[in-house]
Image: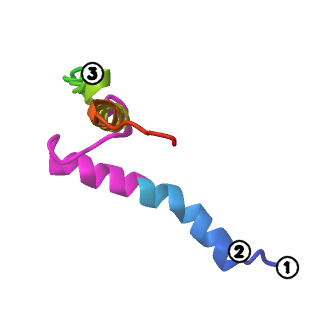
Amino acid sequence: MQFQPSRTQRVLALLPLLVLLLAVAQSAAGPGVVVTASAWAQDAPKPPADVDVTIKTEETRWYVQPIWLAVGAGALILIIALLIAGSRNTTTVVK
């Protein structure tokens, strides 16, 4: 009985030869064309990032905030109303 290799066995047997042929073809093309895995692994060091952080804060004084403006306006109206009411010269006469 004669041994007959299957198609998969023939492809696997020829695979190392194919890899060898590709390596020879790349080396014949010149050093500028060949990119090896070690060249990819050695990435050029990146310079540190130049980060400029500027935080703009706007501070408002307490007397400029809208709630205090409303309280102040209400107090001013109340004072004016009391002054007007107190300046009337009305007397009540009970008979």
In this view, the mark in front (3 or 1): 3
In the image, residue 23 lies in the stretch drawn in magenta = yes
Residue under label 1 = 1
Q: Quadrant of residue 25?
A: bottom left
Under mark 1, the amino acid is Met
Residue 7 in the figure: left or right of residue 66: right
User: Between residues 69 and 23, which one lies in front from this camera angle?
Assistant: 69
Sort mark 3 into few (<14), some (14-19) or many (20+) by Cα contacts within 10 Å.
few
Residue 33 in the figure: left or right of residue 10: left
- What segment carries the magenta color? 20-42
- Overall secondary structure of the magenta stretch? helix
From what the image shows, is residue 5 above or below residue 25? below
In this view, the mark in front (3 or 2): 3
Residue under label 2 = 5
Under mark 2, the amino acid is Pro
From what the image shows, is residue 42 above or below residue 33? above
User: Between residues 17 and 78, which one lies in front from this camera angle?
Assistant: 78
From what the image shows, is residue 23 above or below residue 81? below
Residue 94 in the figure: left or right of residue 47: right
Mark 3 vs 2, N-terminal side:
2
- Residue at screen point 14% across, 43% down: 32
Tell me, yes or no, whether the two marked residues, 3 and 2, touch with CB atoms within 8 Å.
no
Quadrant where the N terminus lies? bottom right
Residue most toward the right? 1
Which element type, helix, strand or loop, lies under badge 2? loop
Mark 3 vs 1, N-terminal side:
1
Q: Position of residue 61 (x, y in %)?
A: 27, 21
Residue under label 3 = 61
Sort mark 2 into few (<14), some (14-19) or many (20+) by Cα contacts within 10 Å.
few
From what the image shows, is residue 69 above or below residue 6? above
Disc 3 to disc 1, C-alpha distance: 103 Å
